[in-house]
Image: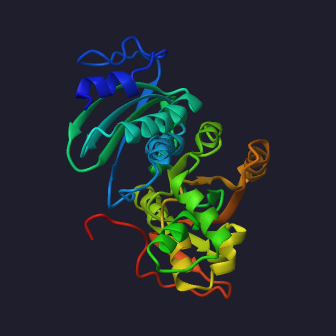
Amino acid sequence: MASEFEIIDRYFTREARGALLGIGDDCALIASMKTIAVSTDMLIAGIHFFQDDDPFLLGRKALAVNLSDMAAMGAMPRWATLALALPSAEESWLDAFSKGFMMQAERYCVDLVGGDTTRGPLAICVQIMGEVEEALALKRSGAMAGDEIWVSGTLGDAALGLAHLQKRIVLDEGDAASCLEALRNPVPRVDLGIRLAGISRCAIDLSDGFCADLGHILERSKVSAIVEADAIPLSEVVEKYRENPVAAHAILAGGDDYELCFTAPVERSEEILALGKSLSMRLTRVGKIAAGAGLTLLDAQGKAIAMEETGYEHFR
């Protein structure tokens, strides 16, 4: 059985081209002339993923969810650390996980510069660091009354896939495959986040659910929002099931979308639509920021929709 240091050397040590010193010392050394953006996410078996999930896809997702935080800040991802708790040093699992993680890191030019391994219940913790111009950072506190609210991609696919696995809904085979791909292999909107610098002042990634995450913007910006539920962008698959209460919940509160929700002044709308075309990405206006507090969600008849649950919370 491989030792802790053999695991690090064999599966996770690569040349750190963007760091002064990478894996192999007590600390990594990095240097930057810009403001450093830092984020950390944990993935716990049985909470964030199933124990028997494909380790290659799990490796990709472990970094993707952190890359999504960089996108939400408009930051360029540069460095990451990885801490793993493993029940055992299973070489086939480690080989597949590390290949998925490293493939994602190479795709976004991220150096793995440190971390830790220990024996314990399966858990993954990634810290990511990136660079951003402080004045252009997309802060949750940047929304202003009169701004339009935009969403990238489509919502609800990943949560609907999870509901299928949990047998809360039964999807057709092809629909299930599409939704499970969204759940297991999210695409972080890094290019969009960077390109929004100077257009938008405010963004968040949709990890806990649309209503909950937009609510974080409203709270930090001290504003309110009016959103038309029918304007929320859906894939063809989710559209098929939208009348099902499970699907309706997935769209508004399901989470795991890792799309960006951002705000921008009305006069930037044509620029945003052009940006979507240049990135071959769907960008959709779903509502407007207003003075006051709270989120008002309207149905097709303009009536307010009551939401009992707005998104995922760990300690509720």
Depth check: give the residue in front, 108 or 310: 108
Specify the quadrant of the image occupied by residue 154: bottom right
The way the protein has been coloured in the rendering is rainbow
Q: Residue furthest left?
A: 119
Give coordinates of residue 28: x percent, y percent: 32, 18
Give coordinates of residue 117: x percent, y percent: 25, 34
Depth check: give the residue in front, 102 or 303: 102
Left or right: 141, with 287 as reference point? left
Residue name at image x 78 percent, y 51 percent:
270
The quarter of the image holding the C terminus is bottom left
Residue name at image x 62 percent, y 76 percent:
229
Q: Is residue 290 above or below residue 56?
A: below
Give coordinates of residue 143: x percent, y percent: 53, 54
Left or right: 27, with 48 as reference point? left
**Whether residue 75 is visible:** no
Left or right: 180, with 230 as reference point? left
Q: Residue furthest top?
A: 20
The quarter of the image holding the N terminus is top left
Residue name at image x 65 percent, y 43 percent:
199
Depth check: give the residue in front, 299 or 93: 93
Q: Is residue 133 above or below residue 140?
A: above
Count of numbered badges drawn on the protein = 0
Residue name at image x 49 percent, y 14 percent:
17
Q: Is residue 48 above or below residue 226?
A: above
**Whether residue 200 is visible:** yes
Give coordinates of residue 95: x percent, y percent: 43, 35
